[in-house]
Image (cartoon, grey):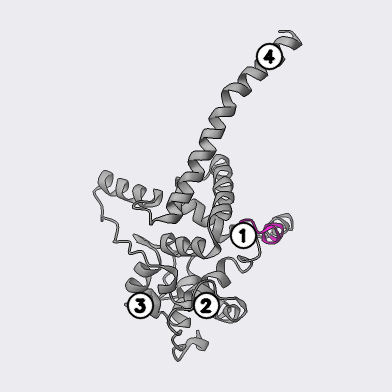
Amino acid sequence: MTRKQKRKKRVSLFRLLGPLVIVVVLLTLAEVALFGWCRPPLTVPRAVAWAGYYLDRGEPPRAQPWVPLEEISPNLRRAVLASEDQRFLRHHGFDFVELGQALHAIWEGGRLRGASTISMQTARTMFLWPARSWLRKMVEAYYTLCLELIWSKEKILEFYLNSVDWGPGLRGAEAAARYYFHCPAVALDAEQAARLAAVLPGPHFWRPDHPNAAVARRIVWIMKEMKKVPLVGGRGPAPLPVRRGAATL
């Protein structure tokens, strides 16, 4: 094949793929905008959970109540930011400081640590399939950019808190608060919020109502870090006081 023929082939390929890429970008931007405007009736993880139920005939997924950000305790908002993404308000979807620290830890022979931001986790839980691959990582990065471009930080945090996995069959702050502490998400006090945030790295192995030693240490650390984290969203009801005994975890 001559150089001219190769160039002609590349031009033809570009003419074919160019419009397709534009259509995909427009459709995904419209999808993100629509999800931000109205509460999604079904997320990808929820659909996967129901499919697993129908295929395995196991226990059906629990109800997933959705609450606006103002009806989620300020304590929980701060606790989750303290635990998962303290630079949430300062980055645009990717925390390169945390990513650099994670890569440095690997280089020094330390353990692998997560560097996903709340924006990245929201993109993953709202739009993507539950599998680990480089393709999904690339699509996750793309959706993260879309979220940061179209949604406010308040909207991203609201969707995260309503879709995050908090244990077997538990999705979202309201379901977790009622299951573990028998109260609505708006009534969580500082210690309860720290307990919920502490198990996010391993919600299927740890329990906020019965913390082991590692989780207990995380709870104490999160409660200290909560004081440094700004409140995202409206204040809502006044936060409840810390229950006695929190400092002895």
Q: What residue type is labelled 4?
A: Lys
Q: Main secondary structure of the magenta part?
A: helix
Q: What residue type is labelled 2?
A: Ile
Q: Name the residue under label 1.
A: 113
Q: Is residue 147 magenta?
A: no
Q: What residue type is labelled 1?
A: Arg
Spatial CA distance of label 4 from label 1 is 47 Å
Find residue 153 and report its image quarter.
bottom right
- Closest to the observer: 168 or 187? 187
Q: How many labels does the image show?
A: 4
Rendered image: mark on residue 8: 4
Residue 119 in percent (x, y) is at 55, 57
Q: Extreme top residue here? A: 1
Q: Name the residue under label 3.
A: 181
User: Which residue is at 57% across, 72% downward?
Assistant: 82
Q: What residue type is labelled 3?
A: Phe
Q: Say if mark 1 contacts mark 3, CB within 8 Å.
A: no
Along the polypeptide, which appears first: circle 4 or circle 1? 4
Rendered image: mark on residue 219: 2
Which range of residues does the magenta coloring cover?
92-101
| Screen quadrant of the N terminus | top right
User: Which residue is at 35% across, 77% downward?
Assistant: 181
Residue 100 in percent (x, y) is at 72, 57
- Look at the numbered disc 4 and give the secondary structure of its residue: helix
